Image (tube, helix red, strand yellow):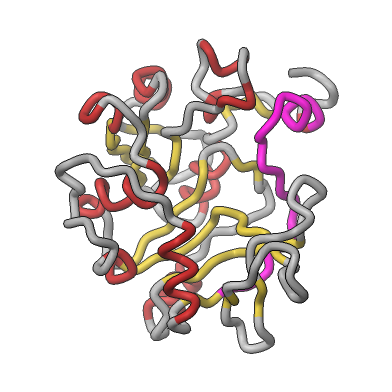
Amino acid sequence: MVLAAGRGERMRPLTDTTPKPLLTVRGQPLMQWPMQALARGGFGRQLVNTAWLGEKISAQFGAQVNWPGLPRVSLAYSNEAQDFGQALETAGGIVRALPQLAEVFWVVAGDVFAPDFVFTQEAVQRFAASPALAHLWLVPNPTHNPSGDFGLSATGQVLNLSKGAAGCDHTFSTIALYKRAFFADCGLPAGNPQGVALALAPLLRAAMDRGQVTGEVYAGDWTDVGTPERLAHLNGGQV
């Protein structure tokens, strides 16, 4: 699942007419980077959730994409704005899409640039065989998030630490594997028929406290493209 429903308020005015995941990074739409990386790993069935200017995303990619040198990608869409008039936040959007997702599935944000990340079948198999319900890839705290999001134990358990606390040395990259069971107790039925907005972070923190979230560090290039300045930096100074 590729998350592409956000409004991108901090990117305005760029996002007034273009959905943030379609902003160009190094010659192609930002969200195309993780989509192609997934395809390269053999994950040819992808679902994209949309809200703000979502019709432009589906018009860009359609129902099927054939990128040169990559396996064919079949695309489905979860149109949150069309169905409910608004984005459903991360967890609400995932639960909305659950009926179309496998028992184990990737989630990646369409507005994060991580060109070195490799999506592998082996990672899925290893996670599926583990007792964990979520597996997160973390990055060392970037300058824009110096207080961090989570800690990581020596045994690979992601720790629910307060921002700025000792050991809160990692930021969530947004790249993760989940089992459908992770969302079983979120209070919403699969499909989220009422269109309830629900944040992901509280669910993750509660699961961490139960010892159900594992993780590892991703050391490659990573940028949360959250401001025009970060976008310009990736493009060599050009927005």
Camera-nearest residue between 234 and 211 = 211
Q: Is residue 194 above or below residue 175?
A: above
* Residue 231 magenta-highlighted: yes
* Residue 152 magenta-highlighted: no
Residue in the picture at 40% in, 19% down: 53
Camera sees residue 45: no
The image quarter in which residue 165 lies: bottom right
Camera-nearest residue between 41 and 100 = 100
Please give the range of residues in magenta: 215-233
Q: Position of residue 59 (x, y in %)?
A: 36, 19
Residue in the picture at 67% in, 46% down: 115
Q: Is residue 127 left or right of residue 117?
A: left
Camera sees residue 127: yes
- Specify the quadrant that holds the C terminus: top right
Q: Is residue 239 above or below residue 66?
A: above
Camera-nearest residue between 159 and 77 = 159
Q: Position of residue 175 (x, y in %)?
A: 54, 56
Residue in the picture at 41% in, 54% down: 43
Q: Position of residue 11 (x, y in %)?
A: 63, 23
Q: Position of residue 108 (x, y in %)?
A: 50, 50
Q: Is residue 2 above or below residue 178?
A: above
Q: Is residue 99 left or right of residue 124?
A: left
Q: Is residue 123 left or right of residue 220?
A: left
Q: Quick one: which residue is furthest to the bottom in this view? A: 155
Count of numbered circles in the view: 0
Q: Is residue 106 above or below residue 114?
A: below
